[in-house]
Image: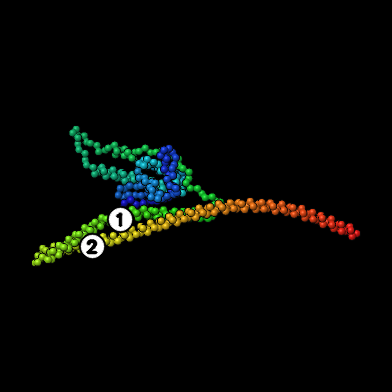
């Protein structure tokens, strides 16, 4: 069956700084898919993560590895073969615990597989010859006792975990900004799924292409053999006075031709199936490109909306300042109007008194 994914999750990926051996360096701009793979042919477990077409994690699990939880959402392990330390930042503690549980499970499986392999090697090894003095040569070597250089390599220093890769959104964030973020996450999830499918289909396509070349060669050989047999049958039919031996040869040749024709038909059907798979892979590639373009358009619209939001906030602030100034002007006018009204009231009372005095 080859190598197959058996568990997947999403996390932010980090690697230890090769210079300082203390600081974390992010190897992915956002959360990516991290998967456990099992190779049934070699009985090997690996942790693999791709950022686009680049492999940012390719770590084979060995019995001497340990996954360490350094915070509620961050864990790390050292890979002596790659001479680095990998760190993963998860969105929740449950995801971290699930990943750590799978790590321990596959580590134990790798240990059992190694022990079985060593037992098989010991059982199938030839008995050692006796030396001249009668002592037996020991089949053990330093590598079998202490492990290989890769397995007993020095484990790099375990650094402190980096800041949390996620942070909660602000409560004052506007609603359409949140909707744009969810749209981006939706397209990113679909794009990641399509990338995974595209990688599987690409591997299947490469394998199918190699098989097609081999089958084409076999098909050409079958056709040549069929033509040669047809020619031989024709020659035998032209021979006068066919003997029973010639008839039996003809029967055998006819059976061989029928078998070759059935094999040729089966190969043609297999070629048709492979062509359909190639067409399906091309359709997935077109869908991937379409989703990538939609994601870019969504990001551009998000940037445009953010720009418009900034402009609206500036205009709102300017309008508030203008409204405040207008209210101050109105208050001043009201105070001035109250004073004028009071003066007019006094003038009216004075005129009324003058009229009364003049009439009396």
Compare marks 2 and 1 and give the one earlier in the sequence: 1
| Residue extending furthest toward the bottom | 241
| Secondary element at tag 1 | helix
Residue in the foreground of this view, choosing between 69 and 13: 13
For label 1, the residue is 208
Disc on res. 125: none
Q: Going by the image, does 89 lie left or right of 202? A: right
- 10 Å crowding of disc 1: few (<14), some (14-19), many (20+): some
Residue in the foreground of this view, choosing between 353 and 171: 353
Q: Residue at x 91, y 59 (%)?
A: 360
Q: Going by the image, does 190 lie left or right of 116? A: right
**Image spot of residue 148 (x, y percent):** 31, 39
Disc on res. 262: 2
| Secondary element at tag 2 | helix
For residue 105, say whether it is visible.
no
Q: Of tags 2 and 1, which is closer to the observer?
A: 1
Image vertical order of residue 169 relative to residue 135, above or below: below
Residue 20: quadrant of the picture: top left
- 10 Å crowding of disc 2: few (<14), some (14-19), many (20+): few
Q: Going by the image, does 202 lie left or right of 69? A: left
**Image spot of residue 58 (x, y percent):** 37, 46
Residue in the foreground of this view, choosing between 128 and 276: 276
**Image spot of residue 356 (x, y percent):** 88, 59
For residue 116, say whether it is visible.
yes
Q: Residue at x 19, y 61 (%)?
A: 226
Image vertical order of residue 154 relative to residue 218, above or below: above
Task: Quote the CA–CA distance across marks 2 and 1.
Answer: 21 Å
């Amino acid at each position: 069956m080859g190598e197959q994914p058996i568990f997947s999750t999403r996390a932010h990926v980090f690697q230890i700084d090769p210079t300082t051996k203390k600081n974390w360096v992010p190897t992915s701009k956002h959360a990516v898919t991290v998967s456990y793979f099992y190779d049934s042919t070699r009985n090997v477990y690996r942790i693999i993560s791709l950022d686009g077409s680049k492999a940012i994690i390719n770590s084979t699990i060995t019995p001497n590895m340990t996954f360490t939880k350094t915070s509620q959402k961050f864990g790390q392990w050292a890979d002596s073969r790659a001479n680095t330390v990998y760190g993963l930042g998860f969105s929740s503690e449950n995801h971290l615990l699930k990943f750590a549980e799978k790590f321990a499970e596959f580590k134990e499986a790798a240990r059992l597989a190694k022990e079985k392999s060593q037992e098989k090697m010991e059982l199938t090894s030839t008995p050692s010859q006796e030396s001249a003095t009668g002592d037996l040569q020991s089949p053990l070597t330093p590598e079998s006792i202490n492990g290989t250089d890769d397995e007993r390599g020095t484990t790099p220093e375990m650094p402190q975990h980096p800041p949390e890769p996620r942070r909660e959104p602000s409560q004052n964030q506007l609603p359409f900004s949140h909707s744009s973020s969810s749209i981006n996450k939706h397209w990113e999830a679909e794009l990641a799924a399509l990338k995974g499918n595209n990688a599987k289909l690409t591997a299947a396509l490469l394998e199918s292409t190699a098989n097609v070349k081999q089958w084409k060669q076999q098909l050409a050989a079958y056709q040549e053999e069929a033509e040669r047999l047809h020619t031989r049958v024709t020659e035998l039919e032209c021979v006068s006075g066919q003997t029973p031996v010639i008839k039996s040869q003809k029967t055998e040749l006819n059976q061989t031709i029928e078998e070759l024709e059935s094999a040729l038909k089966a190969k043609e059907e297999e070629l048709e199936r492979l062509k359909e798979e190639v067409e399906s892979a091309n359709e997935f590639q077109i869908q991937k490109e379409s989703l990538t373009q939609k994601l870019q358009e969504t990001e551009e619209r998000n940037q445009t909306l953010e720009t418009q939001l900034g402009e609206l906030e500036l205009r709102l602030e300017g309008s508030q300042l203008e409204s405040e100034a207008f209210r101050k002007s109105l208050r001043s006018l009201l105070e001035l109007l109250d004073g004028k009204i009071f003066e007019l009231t006094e003038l009216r009372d004075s005129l009324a008194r003058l009229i009364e005095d003049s009439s009396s």
